[in-house]
Amino acid sequence: MLSDARLYSACAAALLYAVGCVYFLWAAPRRQGASTRQANANSSLLIAYASQTGYAEQLARQTAQSLQAAGVLAHVQSLGHLDRADLSHIPQALFIVSTTGEGDAPDTASSFVHQMSSNEQPFAGLKYAVLALGDRSYANFCGFGRQLDNWLRHQGASALFDAVQVDNGDPAALRHWQHQLGTLTNRPDLPDWEAPRYDRWRLASRTQLNHGSAGDPCFHIELEPAGHVPSWTAGDILEVDPHNSTWEHPETPLPHREYSIASLREDGALHLLIREMRREDGSLGLGSGWLTRAPIGIEVAARTRINSNFHPPAEDRPLILIGNGTGIAGLRALLKARSAAGRRRNWLIFGERNRAHDAFYSKDIEDWQRQHILERTDLAFSRDQDQKRYVQHVLLENAERVREWVEQGAAIYVCGSLKGMAPAVHEALERILGRELLESLTSQGRYRRDVY
């Protein structure tokens, strides 16, 4: 018979074995689940939100639904539950963040804000975008969103597109965010969350500007209001319903297209410069294909959208305008506004393929030169010489002059392609001015972009 001591030892061993088995059975699936969640997080696009009232979380989930409809795996997570170390393993992230008080982060994001004070673990591989929610009645509008955007750039992350700022749930700004999601996923047919109320316009004229070009056809298009005359300012955007050959819309909101406006309201018509786009299968793009082929005189459903970030400077300061391709449209409207205001210190840097075929709005440019509206003009036609020359090369070649203009108070406006031109121009400006000064110009509103 076992002694009491030996009996107690045997019972204790059996109990420990049983506890170990139970723990293993309990912990294994959890370890596997955590590993699976980590793998999912690393392979999908992160949507992180910081919400004070729940609105940012709502928009984060709507964003996830749009991405999933485009076939993109996405997961939603509170910024407060995110460790900055996690970001070093994530290839792409969208941040949807509110601002409280005078530029503060929501309470739920306080733990992440604390981590932002550290400069460890740079995010060189992270690509991101920010949807900043705020209220313009406060002095530090979208303060936390702008702070987060600047911090991510400082950490070496690359912006997928410029931050979108939303004033009190402005539906136009949210439609722009959805437009960017469509561009990001290469799915421009994603439906709008809420369809805009379009105005009626008439397609008055259409002229191809680049006959014989190596690129796709580009058309100068003029729209005349078919009812009341909407208002717009240089720098604003036109949202076009590409399915508007009829005014009978289905209940499901339709995807819109955005184009920089190339004219002023005083011109009596709204001007666009549209390049005919083709999909990978060779079919015409939904918006450009319709506008470049629709019969003259047809009604167009469209509405102007305020783009205050690209309005011309209110004060009389020098202006450096940089763009390529159809980006000349937005710059043309700015120069028209500058001319009307009698502000002559303007420097245009514009690039396209060949001078013989792609010199968009050359007569306007010549008129502004003759009238001394353009103090300096540099045109870079990339294929007119053996070694390709782009607008960023013009900037670097004139680095000292760029610094002089900035020291004299100049603002820098960039309009054109998001891929290629915009990052190359940004890199050139960083080399010329330094990152700290360029960020200072951004915070002062002296470095602005309308890129797509």
Image (spheres, rainbow, N blue to C red):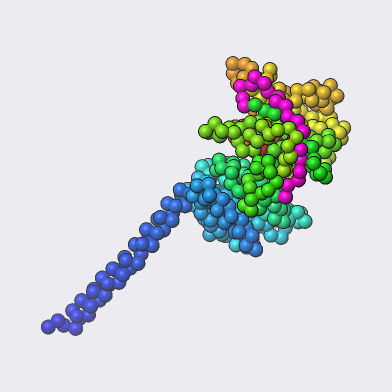
Q: Is residue 21 visible?
A: yes
Q: Nearer the viewer, residue 358 or 392?
A: 358
Give left or right: position of 296 versus 105: right
Give yes or no for residue 203 being in the magenta stretch. yes
Q: Residue 269: percent from the left, percent from the top?
A: 80, 35
Give left or right: position of 413 versus 32: right
Rendered residue at 62%/42% (across/down): 161
Rendered residue at 26%/70% (across/down): 17
> Bounds of the magenta span?
197-216
Q: Nearer the viewer, residue 183 or 5?
A: 183
Image quadrant in which the C terminus is located: top right
Q: Quadrant of residue 79?
A: bottom right
Q: Is residue 184 visible?
A: no
Q: Is 121 located above or below residue 267 in the figure?
A: below
Give yes or no for residue 389 being in the magenta stretch. no
Rendered residue at 76%/56% (across/down): 138
Q: Residue 144: percent from the left, percent from the top?
A: 66, 54
Q: Is 432 located above or below residue 160 in the figure?
A: above
